[in-house]
Image (tube, helix red, strand yellow):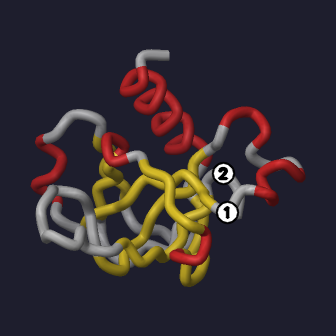
Amino acid sequence: MTRGDIVLVNLPQAADGAGHEQVGTRPALVVPVGLRQDDATSETLSVIMILPFTSNLKAQRFPYTILIQPSTRNGLSTPSVLLVFQLRAIDKKRVTKKIGDLEDELMLKVNAEMKDLLGL
């Protein structure tokens, strides 16, 4: 898995059912883990960093979201909102398959939103 891959992931519900994190099987964007994301070091990590998608277009009301239209390249089937503010690490075992990859111009938007979110 590399930067910009769109994958299907299985995100578990919290044991107590609390919280507002995305759960269930859904697309997610694989994002860089530092500058070494694509080298041999990343292969030794058992986790990846992802940004989950939602098909609930009302989520655009939140900051740090990006509307992504479906395309042959990205593999999405419906317009979806990328939830940059829900950046998280997940075990690689939660990834079920790759469905596509994000277009370069949209990846630039993701990078900018992540930098702003993290205050970098």
The residue that mark 2 highlights is 3
Q: Amino acid type of disc 1?
A: Ser
Residue 83 disc label: none
Q: Amino acid type of disc 2?
A: Arg
Residue found at x 59% / y 81%:
97
**Disc 1 versus disc 2: nearer the observer:** 1
Residue 46 disc label: 1
Q: Which of marks 1 and 2 is nearer the N terminus?
A: 2
Q: What element carries label 1?
A: loop
Q: Kindly indicate the quadrant of the structure image that contains residue 54.
A: bottom left
Residue 90's spot in the image, x, y percent? 50, 61
Residue found at x 46% / y 74%:
9
Q: What element carries label 2?
A: loop
Looking at the image, residue 114 lies above or below residue 76: above
Looking at the image, residue 78 lies above or below residue 87: below
Q: Quadrant of the N terminus?
A: bottom right
State left or right for residue 4 relative to residue 45.
left
Residue farthest along the top direction in this orientation:
120
Q: How many marks?
A: 2
Looking at the image, residue 93 lies above or below residue 36: below
Residue 23's spot in the image, x, y percent? 27, 71
Residue 49's spot in the image, x, y percent? 54, 51
* Within-10-Å neighbours for mark 1: few <14, some 14–19, many 20+: few
Q: Kindly indicate the quadrant of the structure image that contains residue 105.
A: top right
Residue found at x 34% / y 61%:
53
Disc 1/disc 2 C-alpha distance (Å): 16 Å
